[in-house]
Image (spheres, grey):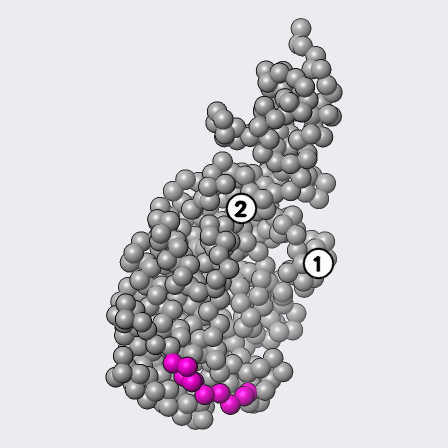
Amino acid sequence: MARTPPFPPAQLEALLARRQGWRAVELADELGVSVPTLHRMLQGLAPQVVSAGKARRARYALSRPVRGVRQRYPLYAVDETGAAEEIATVVPVCPAGTWMPLPAGIWPVPNEARDGWWEGLPYPFYDMRPQGYMGRQFALVAHQPLQVPANPNEWTDDDILYALSLRGADLPGNLIVGQTAYETWLHTKVTPLRLLDEATLGAAYAELAEQAVGSGVAGASAAGEFPKFTTTRAEEGRPTPHVLVKFSGADGSTAVRRWADLLICEHLALEAMRAIPGVDSARSRVLQHAGRTFLELERFDRHGLHGRSPVCSLFSLNAALLGDSSTDWSRLAARLHMDNRLSADTLEQVRRIGWFGKLIGNTDMHLGNLSFRPGPELTLAPGYDMLPMFYAPLAGGEVPEREFGVQPPLPLPPQKTDWHLACEAALQFWRQAEQDARISSDFRQRCGANARKIEGWRGLV
């Protein structure tokens, strides 16, 4: 005959709901029972109890319903060939947070989460959440059916998890959360992709831009503020048809002209970056149609029609692994290197990219604009969002007069090698921008003046 526990299950359930990560001895003390008795009580709540850790690290928590449903969410990873496998399970736990062990050797794990306990969501999920221009467009369209706020910045962790599990079939990186999102992705594999024809690409992009501006476009939740959309286009010889397309306005205002200049500059900057030893960047090209300038960026997290690879922003890595208040790429990369998270070569690459950004007037090098590929060691993903934002119009549309290099970004003696390598690439960028006929004449003059400034700095350092 089964032994009746000394307390009803509801009492243990209420205790577990107070916090996550109880030790067995703590629960036993609270209830005034022996540890063996407690284990029998836990077995009675087995479907609702999450346990993780071995021996003295064993911890217990109560699973928590999301939207009234208590469930475990499968997590899938898609590889570069387009094959997917289930790699983990995500379980919301009481009173807040989740349990999900990150697969060993794929994602770096903070010590406090080595057994799978997270105060919020597992950190890779925060790069998958709706954010930036496309995130706001998605939330505007989907907030009513998903019953979430129209502003994605107001979403709770539960809102994020719920939305990802239903609508997260095409997100940055290679992860898919939940069976519904996974089934949606499977259907895309058996449905022929619509590849935009090269001959009519400008007109197609113009139409997609109008749709994006007018009502929002369902697509990947790529972070950032430039108007953009994702699509697939046919182009022979390229590794993937998947692209992200940024675009300017269509009127002839001064602000729109400047944004168009900056899109062309981003293309030139990404090309120039590849002259820095060890540095790669997203492949891009510029198209112009119907008064708009388009910057087409090949997605480096996509391979072929259906293959994917993981990426993780420095923002998420810092929040999970470092908790540093700095936004300096080199400082944070140095800390990751000290923690054996990335190699000396990768640290060197980050430093060079950082100098390059400063030397081309990129004043928007926030932590979301540098990403890594996870693995046993973090490796640098191709560069992106690299452009002279120093010259961006103000929010109200005004284009102020600004002088670049009032405080020149100059190196200390140990930084000279990296600085000079970045300087050569930056000089190439400014010279190419000065000669590019797609850029307005007044801005080309600025680019030429900046090239001469950098030549002067180079001769003094």
Q: Is residue 404 magenta?
A: yes
Q: Quadrant of the N terminus?
A: top right
Q: Quadrant of the C terminus?
A: bottom left
Q: Can residue 266 be seen by looking at this rendering?
A: no
Badge 1 marks a residue whose secondary structure is loop
The amino acid marked with disc number 2 is Pro
Residue 16: give its label: none
Residue depicted at 57% across the width and 56% down the height: 129
Q: Main secondary structure of the magenta part?
A: loop
Where residue 181 sits: x, y (%)? 57, 48
Q: Is residue 388 magenta?
A: no
Proximity of marks 1 and 2: CB atoms separated by less than 8 Å: no
Is 221 placed left or right of 19 in the picture? left
**Magenta stretch?**
399-408
Q: Is residue 311 above or below residue 253?
A: above
Where residue 167 sits: x, y (%)? 60, 53
Where residue 178 sits: x, y (%)? 57, 44
Q: Quadrant of residue 437?
A: bottom left
The amino acid marked with disc number 1 is Pro
Residue depicted at 57% across the width and 47% down the height: 121
Q: Where does label 1 land, which residue?
A: 149
Residue depicted at 40% across the width and 61% down the height: 331
